[in-house]
Amino acid sequence: MTETTTQIDRDWWAGVEAGKVLFQRCSRCQAATFYPRFACAVCLSPAWHWQECAGQGTVYAFTRIHRAPNPDFEADIPYVVVLADMDEGFRLMAKLKSGSIGAVSVGARVAVAFEGQAAGRPRPCFELL
Amino acid sequence: MSLYRSAAIAGVAESRLGIVPDATVLDLQAEAAIAALADAGVEKSEVDALFCTGRWGRTPQLEIGEYLGIRPFYSDGTAVGGASFLFHLGHAAAAISAGLCDVALILYGSTQRSRKERSLGVKQGLSGQYEDFAGLPNPVGAYALAACRHMALYGTTREQLAEVAVAARQWAGLNPVAFSRAPLTVEAVLASPPVAEPLGRLDCCLVTDGGGAVVIVSPRRAKTLPKRPVWLLGHGETHSHMLISQMPDLTVTPAKEAGARAFAMAGLAHRDIDILQIYDSFTITVLLTLESLGFCAPGSSGTYVSDGRIAPGGEVSLNTSGGGLSYCHPGMFGIFLIIEAVRQLRGECGARQVGRHETALISGTGGVLSSNATCILAGD
C-alpha cells in the first residue's frame, strides 16, 4: 500500500479481507459516508462509527471497458465497471465480476462480491442479482 | 464585488501545435508568450502577474517565470484540470480590479504527444485507493459513465454524440492550424474502436503537443492597445468533486452554478450570446455542459446539437476552432477556448469567422466533470 495509508484505510481494507464492505455512519448527523475519511463529509464531525453494508445496490451507470488503466486489468478486457447506489445511501464503483452472466442495465440490482488478484488482496466487485 | 468590465483581454496566441518533437514545454510557452505579447502590443517588462499550471512541473510558475525572466507581483497556479485557465482569467480580473497588478500573462504548454506522457491510469493517490480497484480508465471511463446515465435517462443516442465530433471536424476543416481536418461522418464515429462504451475513439479529444498564452490588462492599460480589447463581462467558477464516484448527479455539471454566476454578473441572457466555446474533452462533455448552462432543457442536448445546428452555417456558433476533438488538445484545452473566442470577437477568423460576433461565452470543464469556470466576453 502507499505511504498515505492510515489506520482508517487499514481498517477498511481489513473489512474487505473479511468479505465486508464497510462505510462510515456519522454519530452526529447520521450521514453515510464512503470513501472513509477523518471526519463526516456532510457536517465535518470526527465522531463516526463503522457500519457494514448489506451489499446490495442499484446500477446508477455502467461502462464496458476496452482499454485497461493498468496491467492488473488487461486480462479482463472487455469488462464492465458499475457505479451503484448502495441501499445504505452511498455510491460505490466496482468492476462487474469476471464471467458474470446476464445483461447489465441502469436500474439493475447488484450485490457486492470479491475476486482475487494474482498478487495482492481481494478486490470488491459486483454480481448481477 | 463584480468583475464586470474590470479587465480586458489584450492579446492571445498559440505556439506551434500538433506534433512538435524538438521543443520543451518551456519553449512552447515562450513561443506563445512572445506571440501573445506582440498581439497585445505589450512589452514583457510590463507583465506584473503570472498565471500557469500543468502536469509538467512541481512549481510551474517558478520555472516559467525564471525561463522568461518575468518577476510577477501576483502569481496564481490554480490547478483544477483543463478548466484552470478560465479560473485564471477570473482571478486575473479580480487581482487587476483590486489594484494588485496591471498586466497579467496566462500560460500553458504541453509536449504530451511527442513524449508519450498520456496515461489512462494516473494514480489518484489518497482517496483514489477507493476507486482504483474498479479498473476505470481515467478520464475517459468517467465520461463514459456520464454518457451511459444520460442515455438511460433521456434516450440520448450515440448518433447524437457523434454529431458533436462531426461538427467539430467541419469547423477544423476551416482552421488551417487544426490537427485533424479530413471530413468525418457520423457512421465513422460510430465505427471507431470502442474505448469505454458508449464512447469510442472518435468521441475522445486529440492527444497533441502545443501551448497558448493570453494577456489580460487593466481598463487603464486597455486604452492604448493596437487592437480593440475584449472585455470580461461575467465570470463564475466552482468545483464539486475529484472522483467520479463522488459526483452527485452525473448529468449535471458544475457549469450549472458557474454559468448562472457568469450570466448574472454579465447581466445578459442566453439569447444575447453569439458564440459558444464549450470544452469538448469528449463528445458527451458538450451535451452535458449545454444543458447545465441552460442553453437547452435537461435531456434535450442531443436534439440541440443534431441536424447540423452546431456545424458551420448552423444556427449555433459552437467550437469554431474545431475544438479539442479536431483542432488540438495538449492535455488541457481551457486556454484555447479563450484564444478562439477572442479571435472570433475581433473578426480575425477568416474562413471560419461567424457573422454575429459581439458576445461569446466560454465554458471550461476540468477533471472528470469536476470543475467549471464560465466566462462571458464582449468586443469593445
Image (cartoon, rainbow, N blue to C red):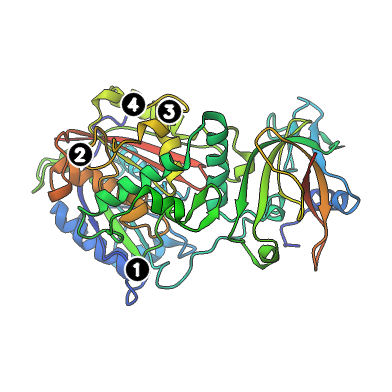
Disc 3: host chain? B
Q: Nearer the viewer, residue B126 or A38?
A: B126
| Residue under numbered circle 4 | B263
Q: CA distance from mark 4 to mark 3?
A: 21 Å
Same-subunit check for callouts 1 and 4: yes
Question: Which residue is identified by label 3?
Answer: B300
Residue positioned 37% across, 68% down in the render: B25
Q: Is residue B185 left or right of residue B292?
A: left
Q: Is residue B144 found left or right of B101 in the rendered image?
A: right
Q: Residues within 10 Å of mark 3 (few under 14, many from 20)?
A: some
Residue at mark 1: B26
Relative placement, left or right, of B110 versus A104 is left
From the image, tell me which residue sits under label 2.
B313
Residue contact at pointers 1 and 3, CB within 8 angstroms: no
> What SS does tag 2 mark?
loop
For disc 1, the neighbor class at 10 Å (few under 14, some 14 to 19, many from 20) is many
Which residue is at 38% across, 26% downward?
B296
Which dot, 1 or 4, sits closer to the camera?
Answer: 4
Q: Are labels 2 and 1 on one chain? A: yes
Do tags 1 and 3 sit on the same chain?
A: yes
Q: Amino acid at mark 3?
A: Ser
Residue B323, above or below A49: below
Q: Nearer the viewer, residue B251 or B11?
A: B251
Q: Secondary structure at mark 4?
A: helix
- Three-letter amino acid code at the position of disc 4: Phe
Q: Earlier in the sequence, mark 2 or mark 1?
A: 1
